[in-house]
Image (tube, helix red, strand yellow):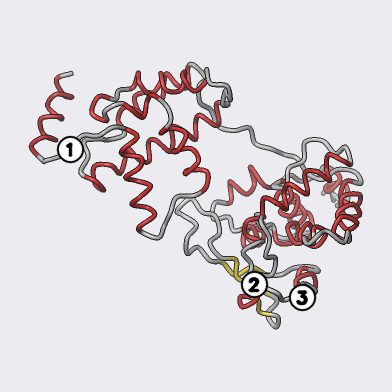
Amino acid sequence: MVHKVERQLIDIEMGLVDCTVGELIQKYLDAKQKSNRPVGRTTLYTLNIVRKTSFAKMLISKVNANDIVSYCLERKKANTSPSPSTLSVDISCIRKVFRVGKSMFGINVDDRPIIDAYPALHDLKLISRSNERERRLEGNEFEILLDALKEKQQHHCCLIPYHDIFLISILTCCRISEVCKLRWRDLDIKQKTIVVRDRKSPNGSIGNHAVLPLLGDALDIILRQPETDKRIFPFNSRSITSGFRRTRKKLNIPDLRYHDLRREGASRLIEMGYSVEETARVTGHRDLNVLWRVYVNIRPQHFLKRKIVASA
């Protein structure tokens, strides 16, 4: 308690000001927008939810570890009842704003309350890491999805080439948002490469461009698209995933998300004999451990195809 009082006195001497949690969040969002480096969709969605809670009305200088725990308990009682992994994202976003509040805005805040709250949050199982998925296309799912999506895109009312985008997603291991950003001017037909702009990265996606090799039939699929826009696939990513989800449900294929196609593509590259470093060049991963742990799921049948030579 003495240390906290001393710190507050020092902050007052430094001219630091106070505000509510909600006001700090708004200052942060405005500053990011003005810097032309706006926060991502998930962070924006999360911080806007935080702003609607009673926690957002608290003065920053009064926030302690118990208030962080109380915030999570309040969220758990809500109609949506978020999972521990979702609350973990909440806390991470709040901590990010608290961590930069003093240096960016001269506000009397730091992330100490959140750090102090972690033991209780974990003990009460209010936060946790999300379960790592291992879902891949099984059996004849690839073939029946391909046929159904081809039939879907041939309908006279359909403008989205679901069949081609499905294949491109697997061949490039790109997120659907990245597929929809691919531009004609970034395509190098001679080198069989294309620039993927603003790839998702822990350090921020803006300006994180990468040259992607177009493997398999990827280049042919791109070249058969009509050049009607600066983008090769000028469609809303949510419309694509929504259409895919309806097709999947119609085919009674359970527990398959569009993002699982990224894992499918990465796993296929490894099974084809590409090294993890080569695969990372396609997926965009800088941390090879993340690539192995989250995005690669090699089937047991893969090992049965290889001859094992035992030495005498």
Q: Hey, what amino acid is under mark 3?
A: Leu
Residue under the image location 26 percent in, 48 percent down: 104
Q: Hey, what amino acid is under mark 2?
A: Ile
> Residue 216's quadrant in the figure?
bottom right
Residue 45 visible at all: yes
280, 189: nearer the viewer: 189
Q: Which residue is mark 1?
A: 17
- Mark 2 and mark 3: Cα distance apart in space: 12 Å
> Residue 82's quadrant in the figure?
top right
- Mark 2 and mark 1: Cα distance apart in space: 49 Å
Residue 312 visible at all: no
Quick check: 156 above or below 59?
A: below
- Nearest to N terminus: mark 2 or mark 1: 1
Residue under the image location 86 percent in, 45 percent down: 301
Position of the N terminus by quadrant: top left
- Nearest to N terminus: mark 2 or mark 3: 2
Q: Hey, what amino acid is under mark 1?
A: Val
